[in-house]
Each structure stands twice: as structure tokens, then as C-alpha cells.
């Protein structure tokens, strides 16, 4: 057992632990959740699995496990830290990470990393699979399942004589709410992969005078009405695909170009 976890486990397990868990406030609050029954089942399985493998859970770790399985969303470390602080649970960040690594190791949780590089955990339901949409603006995560996509992947793997065991799909973009509010914005704010249409160029004379390749820029189409795609935007130069040409713009220059997002 990991050293950081040794204080979370006790050899004196309350006999009514499962009963206590099922009547906890977190589980009661989750009663109306359509997935609540599944979450309750996997929670019981987790506690019994730990018991059968000689691991006994103390009260602090039990409360973390109940919190995790009562959540109806992907749980980030920040969510866990906030829960620990609000409930005055004495447990270190290292012990939290080790505890959730244990759940991942034993197949009760999956570690996910989306576009913001934040580690999140979700329940692992055996025999089930889903993929994710991730909104780059608000961080919303939408789960979806498509039998057509699953069948297509099997066919493609077969065509390539490849035997696949597992896969994960994350589609990054903007949710309906964020896309609807993204009217006029600086080109510098468009994320990697975003498609845009140039609406206006602020102070055109200054813009073109500041560009050493004025003729080239105009030939490529850095003009109102031109559509393009952001190849990379990592905070420095922004690289675009416009009229099948790759264009790199400085940060200041891209801030002066106003665009709208397009499908």
C-alpha cells in the first residue's frame, strides 16, 4: 500500500459502512439523478472490492469516495479540494491524488484530461462507453454515444487489420451557448481549429503599414469577407490557413482583425 494512504485506512471497519453510505447526505441529494442508481451500485461494489482485497477504508477516505460517486459530473481535483475544505477533512493533496489513483488502478474511475489540461475523474461503468464534446470557452463537458461512430471505427480497424481494445474521442469547440454569444471578436481570441470570417480590420492603414508583406497579405486575402481556419494559437504568433496558404501574424496584428466564428 502507498505510504501516503496508510493513514486513510483502518483495520477496524464499521460493520454498517455500506448502510451508512446509502443513507449519507450525498447519496440522498443524488436521488433524483437518472444515473443515481448506477452510481450507488458502483459505490457499493467499490467498497466491497476494497474490503475483499484487504483494504479497509477510514471515515475520511469513505467520505471522499461517497462524494465522488454521488457526483453527476466529471470531478476535478479543485472540486475535491473544495469538498475537503468545506467538510474540514484532514487530508493532504498528495493523499487525495493517491486515493483517486487507487480508484483508477482498481477500475472504478477514469482519469480524463481535456483542453484546459486539468485532471478530472469520472465513474467507470463496466461495459459502457461514451465520448466527449469539450467547450474551449466555458469548459462545459457533454457526454455522447453514437452507435454509428462505434460501428465505423470497428470497420476502419478491420480494413487496416488492426485489433483495437479501447479508444477515446474528444471533440473540442464551442457549446451552443458560447457559440451563440461569440459575435464580433478579435482574431487573437479564436482557439486552435476555429473557423472564422473576417468582418473588419481596425485602422487599415496602420495595419497594412505595419506589415512587411503588404502585397502578399492582400493577395492571400487578409481582407473583410475572407474565411479561414486557425492552425495554431498558443498565446504568441497565430498561424492561419487562408486560401490554402499558411499565414503567421503577430499578436498585436491579430488583435486588430475582427472576426465572427463560422461552422
Image (cartoon, helix red, strand yellow):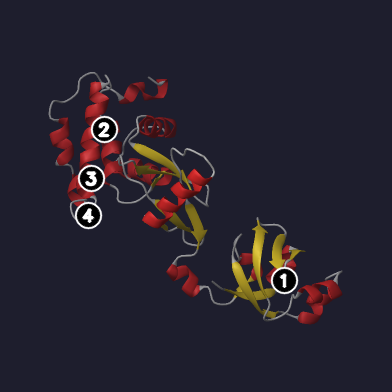
Q: Quadrant of the N terminus?
A: top left
Q: Nearer the viewer, mark 1 or mark 3?
A: 1
Residue 23: where, in percent of width, then height? Answer: 14, 42
Q: Please name the residue shown 32% across and 26% down the image.
A: 8
Q: Residues within 10 Å of mark 4 (few under 14, many from 20)?
A: few
| Disc 4 to disc 3, C-alpha distance | 9 Å
| Left or right position of 28 against 70 | left
Describe the element under mark 4 as helix, strand or loop: loop
Residue 146 in view, yes or no: no
Residue 34 is labelled as: 4
Residue 42 in view, yes or no: yes
Mark 2 or mark 3, earlier in chain = 3
Q: Nearer the viewer, mark 4 or mark 1?
A: 1
Residue 150: where, in percent of width, then height? Answer: 41, 51
Mark 1 or mark 3, earlier in chain = 3
Q: Which residue is mark 1?
A: 243
Q: Please name the residue shown 66% across and 60% down the image.
A: 231
Q: Residues within 10 Å of mark 1 (few under 14, many from 20)?
A: some
Mark 2 or mark 1, earlier in chain = 2
| Disc 2 to disc 3, C-alpha distance | 12 Å
Mark 4 or mark 2, earlier in chain = 4
| Disc 4 to disc 2, C-alpha distance | 20 Å
Q: Please name the residue shown 31% across and 41% down the image.
A: 127
Q: Please name the residue shown 24% across and 18% down the image.
A: 11
Amino acid at each position: 500500500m502507498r505510504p501516503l494512504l496508510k493513514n486513510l485506512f483502518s483495520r477496524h471497519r464499521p460493520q454498517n459502512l455500506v448502510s451508512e453510505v446509502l443513507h449519507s447526505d450525498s447519496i440522498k441529494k443524488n436521488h433524483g439523478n437518472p444515473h443515481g442508481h448506477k452510481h450507488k451500485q458502483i459505490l457499493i461494489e467499490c467498497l466491497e472490492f476494497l474490503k475483499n482485497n484487504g483494504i479497509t477504508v477510514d471515515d475520511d477516505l469513505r467520505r471522499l469516495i461517497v462524494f465522488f460517486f454521488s457526483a453527476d459530473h466529471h470531478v476535478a481535483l479543485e472540486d475535491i479540494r473544495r469538498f475537503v475544505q468545506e467538510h474540514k477533512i484532514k487530508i493532504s493533496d498528495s493523499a487525495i491524488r493517491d486515493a483517486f489513483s487507487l480508484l483508477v488502478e482498481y477500475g472504478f474511475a477514469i482519469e480524463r484530461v481535456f483542453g484546459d489540461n486539468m485532471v478530472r475523474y469520472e465513474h467507470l461503468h463496466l461495459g459502457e462507453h461514451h465520448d466527449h464534446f469539450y467547450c474551449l470557452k466555458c469548459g462545459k463537458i457533454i457526454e455522447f454515444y453514437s452507435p454509428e461512430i462505434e460501428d465505423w471505427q470497428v470497420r476502419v480497424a478491420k480494413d487496416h487489420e488492426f485489433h483495437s481494445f479501447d479508444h477515446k474521442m474528444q471533440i473540442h469547440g464551442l457549446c451552443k451557448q458560447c457559440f451563440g454569444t461569440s459575435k464580433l471578436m478579435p482574431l487573437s481570441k479564436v482557439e486552435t481549429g476555429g473557423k472564422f470570417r473576417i468582418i473588419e480590420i481596425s485602422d487599415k492603414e496602420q495595419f497594412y503599414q505595419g506589415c512587411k508583406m503588404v502585397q502578399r497579405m492582400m493577395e492571400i486575402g487578409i481582407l473583410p469577407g475572407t474565411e479561414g481556419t486557425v492552425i495554431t494559437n498558443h498565446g504568441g504568433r497565430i498561424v492561419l490557413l487562408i486560401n490554402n496558404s499558411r499565414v503567421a501574424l503577430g499578436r498585436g496584428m491579430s488583435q486588430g482583425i475582427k472576426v465572427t466564428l463560422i461552422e
